[in-house]
Amino acid sequence: MTNGAEPVTIRNIEVPFWRIVAILIKWSIAAIPAAIVVTILYVLILGLLGGLVAGIFELAGIPIPEVPTPPAQP
């Protein structure tokens, strides 16, 4: 440290319990839209990758099996 500054160690921070609870509630509420955005991104990315793989299979002549549908209930 050439500028004459002295190191500082923080030993204790006093924060009221209910303030911490409020912060955690705010973080929980903020996580909901973030999870929605991440889910949408995952769906888009996996959809693009699935389409890419299906296109590669089609170009290579590999048949893509169809998903069987259950019979209709009378």
Image: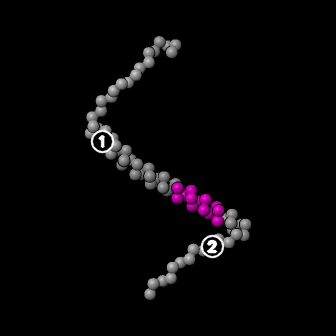
Q: Is residue 48 magenta?
A: yes
Q: Which colouring convention does the figure follow?
A: one colour
Image: magenta residue range: 42-54
Quarter of the view holding residue 65: bottom right
Marks 1/2 in contact by CB < 8 Å: the verdict is no
Cα separation, mark 1 vs mark 2, equals 52 Å
Q: Which is nearer the N-term, disc 1 or disc 2?
A: 1
Q: Amino acid at mark 1?
A: Val
The residue most toward the bottom is: 74
Residue 55, horizontal then vertical, whole percent: 66, 65
Q: Residues within 10 Å of mark 2 (few under 14, many from 20)?
A: few
**Left or right of 39, for residue 46:** right
| Closer to the camera in the image, 43 or 21 | 21
Q: Residues within 10 Å of mark 1 (few under 14, many from 20)?
A: few
- Residue 21 is labelled as 1
The residue that appears at 44% across and 54% down in the rendered structure is 36
Q: Amino acid at mark 2?
A: Pro
The secondary element bearing badge 2 is classed as loop
The residue that appears at 36% across and 49% down in the rendered structure is 29
Q: Which corner quadrant holds the C terminus?
A: bottom left
- Residue 65 is labelled as 2
